[in-house]
Image: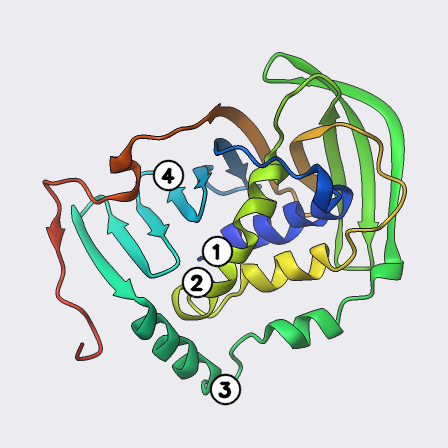
Amino acid sequence: MNHRLRSAFVVALVALVAIPATALAQEDMSVSMLMESAGEDSNEMTFTVAGDMARMDFAEMVSMIWSPDWMRMLQHQEQMWMEFNSAMLQQMRSMMGNVPGAPDVEDELDAFDPSNLSFEVTGNTDTVMGMEVFEVAFTAGDDNSGSMWMSEDAEVGIFEVFARMMTHLDSLAGPMMSGDNPAGDMQQYMAIAQAQGMPDGKILRMDSADGTRITMTGWEGGPFPEDTWAAPSSYQKQAMPFGW
């Protein structure tokens, strides 16, 4: 995952602290969002979860699909795909652990201080997906700050699907995220899930101090067709790297 997309994850996942575990949506869902950074192209992303299956679509470039036993990566421009079984993923995680400077989830957790988190309802309003949203400014130490725009009328927000995907990303992040670790970021913010001060509502947009914006653009509930978890029949399966 490139720096811009990871930055969007880091900013957005602060909002997970506002979602008690008992309130997380259990239904299958697919949530689409637009990620924008100042001076850079925007990125459309879709996150889909159903039972123990999950899928991330990065614009029209790459999709990652995974179950407890395998992970598939689809490259859409090349119309190719590859599959990694659990043994391959574990081997790659071990390889990443031996790389100097590779991210470590426990180190990231130790470096984060939940006591720095604070929220403030500003009184500002806007409209997202045709619904009125109100602004909640947040700060989490010196590195993370911005605004969450929340709706009291929405059925689903951005972070229900993010929370559902956390356990999936934990198994994927080490070998497949190009040295970055969004699963570590998720665990940082889930570690302070009992923080007080967040009003009720669903988060439909996030704005960060560095100009990153994440806006929910749509969602749908399951069940999803079986081909959601498969590569298109027209795609060529790639030979496995690393001598497998």
Residue named by callout 2: 172
Residue named by callout 4: 59
Mark 3 touches mark 1? (CB < 8 Å):
no
Mark 4 touches mark 3? (CB < 8 Å):
no
Mark 2 touches mark 4? (CB < 8 Å):
no
Spatial CA span between label 3 and label 1: 25 Å
Looking at the rendering, which quadrant does residue 107 occupy? bottom right
Query: Pointer 1: residues within 10 angstroms few (<14), some, or many (20+)?
Result: many
Residue type marked 3: Pro
Left or right of residue 198, residue 45 in this image: left
Residue 3 shows in this picture = no
* Mark sitting on residue 131: none
Spatial CA span between label 4 and label 3: 31 Å
Camera-side residue of 174 and 58: 174
Pick the quarter of the image with the N terminus.
Answer: bottom left
Disc 3 versus disc 1: nearer the observer:
1
Residue named by callout 3: 100
Q: Earlier in the sequence, mark 2 or mark 4?
A: 4
* Mark sitting on residue 168: 1
Q: Position of residue 216 (x, y in %)?
A: 56, 29
Disc 3 versus disc 2: nearer the observer:
2
SS at badge 3: loop
Q: Earlier in the sequence, mark 3 or mark 2?
A: 3
Residue type marked 2: Leu
Residue type marked 1: His
